[in-house]
Amino acid sequence: MTLRNFSNLKVILVEPNGPLNVGSVARLCSNFEVDELRIVSPKCDIFSLEAKKMALKGQKFIEHCKIFDNLQKAIFDCDLVLASCGRIDVKKDSFFGSFEDIFGWTLSFKKINNLAIIFGREDRGLTNSELLLANKTFNIPTSQNNPSLNLSHAVSIVLYELNKSSKNNLNNELKVFNLASTKEVHDAFVEIEKMLLRVGYLLKHTSKPKISKFKNFILRANTSIHEINVLRGIVHQINWFLNNSNKK
């Protein structure tokens, strides 16, 4: 089974602590013809015999997987980043979307050169700051009495549903992909936060939650490359003005 209009699909595991889960995910990567398995700071021996036995024909994904020391580095070359989150206490102003809507939206583009899907830690998932590195975040609907899924089970559901959605969207008219990447959004907000701290709009001890809300808004708005560049241009101009006004 193949996933249409994704030339490079990356599955990213953050700090997995079970070699059997890593092996199972590697096998799933082979089942669904994923391009690459990436692992952030593994907490187990991903090259162990246990992992390789579980991987079967997916052993090549273990042997050739790329390991990173933080999530930001793992998505540096990705045009679009999706994140799976197991939380059920989602606030109304969050940027979580439904399973079906996000996959349908993802498949509405002609071509995405590098798509990443992030899966969090087995015991506590992804942090708020890690979730903000994704363009879209989704939840796999399960029983509220027992919402937690095994890591490899979550990966299997996501890859299956993405493959199914791909087949259902074959005849749809597709749009050109021109969204700002998560790296471009992140870099813009590093500059924005520094500028807002400089002018006194933000305070150091409260800047992170406030800037996160602003970043949430930008992510939900499906901001284009041109729009994020305009935003960065405004920040650069304000900084230029501040630097030059201080010289007078």
Image (cartoon, rainbow, N blue to C red):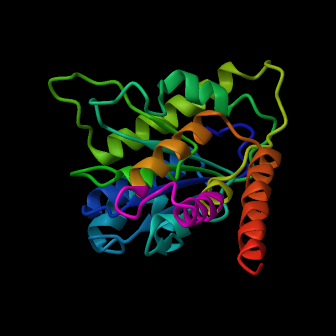
Query: Residue sitting at 83 percent across and 30 percent down?
Result: 175
In the rendered image, which quarter is residue 16 located in?
bottom left
* Residue at image point 77% right, 55% down: 234
User: Which residue lies at the image location 51% right of the left edge and 69% below the top edge?
Assistant: 65
In the rendering, at what x and y percent does residue 86 appear?
31, 37
Q: Quadrant of the N terminus?
A: top right
User: Magenta span: helix, strand or loop, mainly?
Assistant: helix
How many labels were placed on the picture?
0
Question: Can you say whether 56 is above or below 128 in the image?
Answer: below
The residue range painted magenta reads 188-207
**Image location of residue 69, percent across then percent down:** 43, 75
192 drawn magenta: yes
* Residue 62 falls left or right of residue 180: left
Q: Nearer the viewer, residue 89 or 27?
A: 89
- Looking at the image, the residue that sits furthest to the left is 145
Q: Position of residue 198 (x, y in %)?
A: 56, 67
Q: Establish if 124 lies above or below 149.
A: below
Image: 236 above or below 64 = above
The image position of residue 73, as x and y in percent, is 54, 70
Residue positioned most to the front: 248
198 or 33: nearer the viewer:
198
